[in-house]
Image: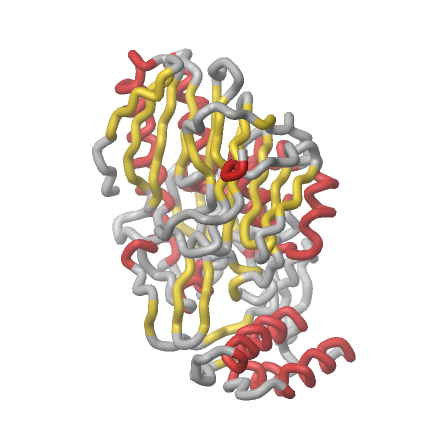
Amino acid sequence: MSTALAARHDLGAGLAAADLNALGVEVRLVTTAPELLEAATTMLTAELGAIDLACSRFRADSELVRLNASAGATVGVSSLLAQAIAVALDAARTSGGDVDPTLGSSLVRLGYDRDFCQLPAQADPVAVTIWRGSSWQQVELDIAARTVRVPAGVQLDLGATAKAWCADRAADRIHAELGAGVLVSLGGDIAAAGHPPAGGWPIRVQDRRRLAGAQADGPTATVSIQGGGLATSSTTARRWRRGDLTLHHLLDPRTGMPALSPWRTVSVSAPTCLAANVATTAAIVRADNAPAALRRAGLPARLVSHTGEVTCLNGWPVEVDDDHR
Amino acid sequence: MSTKDQRIAARARGRRRLGAATVALAATGVVGSAGLAWAAEHSAATASGTSQATTTNATTSSPTSTPTSTPSPTPTSAGSSSTTVTQTSSSAASKAASSQTTSSAAPTTTTSNPVATTSGS
């Protein structure tokens, strides 16, 4: 894993932060005990490295790459990868298949076959393949024996769950080990553990109308959480073009194609970052049915339409745009 | 193909310069409305925009798996059955699953300077 060295920041109010890059995203660690920042960063880096080695779809030496190349054979895996796959399959089950870890082959066919930062923004047309259904139910996992069989032709992509799960694991472990309040953000998948700062953890929830990397210019708000998780999924975060098609990374398992959704950005707070991220991903896929599903789940949520209209559910505070305070 | 799909297909066919995608999909009758809608929307964007008709090829794959909303094994069109196998939950997975249906304390508005940003990844 290429993990950039951490840059340290004093945030005031007794908070310190470290920034680094890992898993293809910007990582931020914040703690209420600045004197423990270095130790916390070391723990986080170790966690990121372990997850990357187990779950990366892009590095040749990862366990997941070997598993995806196993052509339907049953293979032994590490406890960490077995757990990560169990988490992903559970996400598929609890979301009714809307968050599906078996879409790796579809992503590859659409051109997303390397770290996103290395992906050409524009390239030749790709062959579009429409899948009728998903195959997550056909993945055979025996977590006790630590064996997995992925059907031939299917590639697992754990991107929808592994990062959020890693944020939860890291925050929980750092808090358990060091006792400090801690917030871990992996590309905006946020987990907080331990005693929060006074007033909670203030987090900017930022919509983007344009591609990541461009100036963030969509509706934004700052909210505070006391703990748990907060995640955002957006169809503008990872986009690329092949031929005349603009594609994004949130695929609809019913087609294996980028989801057609009225929502460009969905944020959810939940008891864990993983639960939040599963909910946001499913909401994009569920399209018009997302608000009803989120209401049933009771998860506070913020949905931004393609025209920039914001819908707040389940107690998410109706906001005054930060730009208009 | 259902009546709804036929309507969608007809609408899609009526669009200018569809490219191969929608036509091929409509002809097969294999895919449902979601796939047709996807192709139609993107073809429409092509037709209404300044870009040329898509040269993207459309193919259909054999439906070898079960619908996402059907947890039990379902015969495929090829006549075989998919197999659902043991998926043992870990504690972490169980935690994630349980939290899916557990309500969460809502965030509150704050004027404090943010310590992190979430914008999708």
Residue extending furthest toward the front: A324
Tell me where residue A90 appears, x and y as whole percent: 58, 43
Vertical arrangement, residue B76 with respect to residue A298, above or below: below
| Residue A256 visible in the picture | yes
Colour scheme: secondary structure
Count of numbered circles on the image: 0
Vertical arrangement, residue A64 with respect to residue A119, above or below: above
Q: What residue sits 59% from the left and 49% below the top?
A: A304
Q: What residue sits 52% from the left and 20% below the top?
A: A200
Residue A308 left/right relative to A103:
right
Q: What residue sits 50% from the left and 51% below the top?
A: A234
Tell me where residue B80 appears, x and y as whole percent: 62, 70
Q: Quadrant of the C terminus of chain A?
A: top right
Residues B34 and A235: in front is A235
Residue A290 left/right relative to A234:
right
Locate residue B35: give its quadrant. Answer: bottom right
Q: Quadrant of the N terminus of chain A?
A: top left
Residues B60 and A190: in front is A190
Tell me where residue B38 appears, x and y as whole percent: 58, 71
Residues A161 and B75: in front is A161
Vertical arrangement, residue A187 with respect to residue B17, above or below: above
Q: What residue sits 53% from the left and 17% below the top?
A: A199
Residue extending furthest toward the right: B3
| Residue A134 visible in the picture | no
Locate residue B55: give its quadrant. Answer: bottom left
Residue B74 left/right relative to A46:
right
Residues A147 and A319: in front is A319
Tell me where residue A13 appears, x and y as whole percent: 39, 14
Locate residue B51: give its quadrant. Answer: bottom left
Residue extending furthest toward the left: A5
